[in-house]
Amino acid sequence: MATESIKYLAPDADNKAKTQVFPRPGQHTTGLVDWLTTIDHKKIGLMYGLTALFFLIIGGIEALLIRSQLWDHNMAVLTNREYNQMFTMHGTTMVFLVIMPLSAAFFNFIMPLQIGARDVAFPRMNALSLWCFVGGGIILNLSWFFTGGSPAIGWFGYAPLTDTRFAEVIGDMGPDFWIFSLQILGVASLLASFNFITTIINMRAPGMTMMRLPVFTWMTLIVSFLIILAFPAITIALVELMFDRTYGTNFYDFLEGGKPHLWQHLFWIFGHPEVYILILPAMGIVSEVIPVFSRKPLFGYGLIVFSGAIIGFMGFAVWSHHMFTTGMGVVATSAFAMLTMLIAIPTGVKIFNWIGTMWGGRIRFDTPMLFALGFITMFMIGGFTGIMHSSVPIDAQHQDSYFVVAHFHYVLIGGALFGLFCGFYFWLPKLTGRMMSEKVGKFVFTLMFLGFNLTFFPMHYLGMIGQPRRTHTYNEGHGFETWNQIATVGAFILGVGIAIGVLQFINSFFNKKLKPAGKNPWDARTLEWTLSSPVKEYNFARTPIIKARDQAWENNYGPKENHSEKEPLDDHGVHMPDRSWWPLITALGLLGLAIGMLFHRTIDPSGELVRDYTYPIIAGAVAILGMIMWALEGPGGYHLFPKEDEE
Amino acid sequence: MSDASAHALEHHEPVTSTGIPNKKVLMWAFLGSDCMFFGTLISTHLIYRKISATVGGNFLDIRDVFDIELTSFSTFILLASSLFMALAVSAIHKGNLNSTRWMLFGTIIFGAIFLACQVYEFTHFIHAPGNELTLSTYRGEPHVFGSTFYVLTGTHGTHVAIGVFWLLGWLAYSFTGKMSTAHALDVEICGLYWHFVDIVWIIIFPVVYLMEYAL
């Protein structure tokens, strides 16, 4: 790319230079330094995605170990404690380190392109979110190497499992690692959500009204609101738990007046919106893909958007359906049962709208479309079993059985993961500039679809005949063996499918032999498809002026008055913010603070508890210093002068 | 407004879709989220206040520990600090640097007085003779009141402390000679945070303190 450029010097550049501890990486930075200091939303999205795929492999291996242990009655692949650790780590990893960051990867990469923005509102804060996510992932997985190993408390960490007095291993640090990891991941999610909300509300291109926003962007907005309103509940619950474990408070200590029940409430006030945080991005992706491959506009755009908003809103009013068997009383139980049945309506509306989009369309069965169809069918099965659970007597029967495991895996793999894979097959060409093999893609889909159903469909039956979840083995004579063996075979097929898929994604970054994608390989409809693949670092050479909802489509096929226009080239050029070290340093400070707090207690030879805050204070100071230097350095920047249509 | 400052504003604050600056939207989003943080803490306190009303079989009368005169005073001080904050924002909008400095200074001092009262309060409660209220006990018996009370008011105190340091940062910056009306927005956002922390106290004070005297 022969874009000429000049270094942009702010009026107070001399002052800025004085406050720099080390030189700020400039415009032409490459290699490792570029990746560590980048504030480009596309590179950050890519790093989110790759890190999450790495954790997907780890969480997948944990799942396969669980399935191996359940192959036959009284197997000894894992001990009971190891089994508990596996399902805890599998759940926590898949929710916080795979599905959420994979969604964040798409939010980062796609959303600014869809609204005609050059970056998110706060590019450096975006980098901080990324590094906090990586830090949280590191802390969680460090737990394997310290006293007690990984947490064995479930991803829900119910009290009093987390009570130090009931630890199976004396001085068990697993729950502490879990707490601090979730706190840091919470910081990452909150910062990212503040950023996305500001970006979508404030940085839309001229003419991009709210009701012209692509559905995926709408879902990004709704999910971001869910995150900023739901995460505080778990953050405070975790703070209280941390105080219980570290300073001996009694929040969840039933021997000293605390109520373990409160933990369940606080956890699920977060936990149920979290379910929608996991699924709505996938719904957004599918809403983008289905119209493209049906050659029709999205049916009922407004309904889909407002159904998403209603799902998000009502998601805060159904948390207690996770607690029907805790004895909340008839009134509370009935109210939550009713609201849970009600929330199925907007979900059903969406499904009918997708079907309506396909109805009468000229459907092309490319890989993204296959995954989208897989999403709809599998998510529907998960949804039906979900509605079954809204009925209290049925829920009481299914509680803690494999039926529930089947239900939420249909929602989270058949739903969320299929949706995200659909997104990968759809948007990766935009990212890499290369098309992926349709043959391999369809093979991956077949393996995943088959493997997934083989694994989880039998679990419905296993749950009905009484196999309990979260139990490391079963005895002979219950008739559990056959279906468990089918499930295990299915899990390995699913694992192979996912692994081939991930390899295919990575291959498309490096394999120069693949077909170039061009601007709009799928003949798609949203704004990101008007840009070259891969997208230039400034995204849009000239800010587009939006005239219609499906702008890329209208530009190609619509009447003249619907074609987008472009703002004139600015003679100042495109202002690009500078890279920065401070987000990484601030995140390292927070990581150090968490690790320091994990190890600040020691028992001296006389058996006294000694608290040493030296390391947490040093690490906290690094984080604060990072923030101060961040504020002082300012956005900085340089100007690029792209040619007329170089985008 | 002179051309130079108009240009500076233009450069710092790009045109936004809503006309509201990005930083302000960010702060409002954060405050919305912070409501939920305090909402969770306050509900935890209220729930336990209701279901753990006794200690060692006796009704828990926390008035034996509380020093309502002191807390009323510190409440007044914190609310008064909001006036200084508002005046500081107004001064920086008008470009009156000297006045901005004094008003920031006033806010900081009042915030610091509030914090000092809280430190005094905490130390006194923990050592109240015969009525010791610690993180895990009351009068030597295990109880939850100390847990919820200290963590809730402590979280609020942490918010005030963060605000004080933030304002100190602006006070220090005002002496570098670089501060101008271009920073009015940043001070205003700092003010939004400060007022919010005040409002939270307006809820905490009646719910946690005054209600104990309404029985």
Image (cartoon, rainbow, N blue to C red):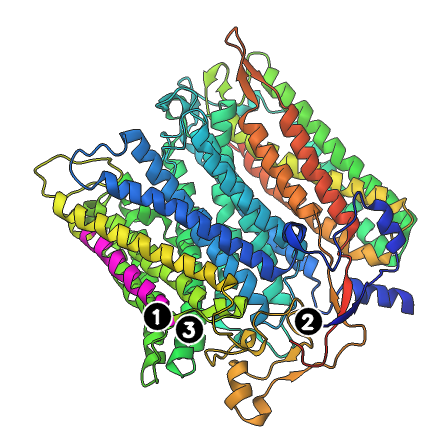
Q: Residues within 10 Å of mark 3 (few under 14, many from 20)?
A: many
Q: Tag 2, which secondary structure?
A: loop
Q: Is residue A445 magenta?
A: yes
Residue A395 in view here: no
| Nearer to me, B158 or A624 | A624
Q: Mark 1: few, some, or many residues within 10 Å (few <14, many ≥20)?
A: few
In magenta stretch: residue A169:
no
Label 3 residue SS: helix
**First reached walking from the N terminus: tag 2 or tag 1:** 2
| Chain assignment, label 1 | A
Give the residue type at disc 3. Val
Q: Which residue is mark 2?
A: A1
Q: CA distance from mark 3 to mark 2?
A: 31 Å
Q: Amino acid at mark 1?
A: Lys
A480 is higher (above) or lower (below) than B51: below
Extreme residue toward the bottom, this view = A560
Nearest to N terminus: mark 3 or mark 2: 2
Q: Nearer the viewer, residue A276 or B87?
A: A276
**Which residue lies under the disc numbered 1?**
A439
Q: Residue at x 36, y 32 (%)?
A: A152
Residue at 62% of width from left, 54% of height from top?
Answer: A126
The image shows residue A238 at horizontal and vertical percentages of: 48, 36
Q: Nearer the viewer, residue B38 or A625?
A: A625
- Of all chains, the one bearing label 3 is A
Marks 3 and 2 belong to one chain: yes
Instruction: Give the residues drawn in magenta, as a range.
Output: A438-459
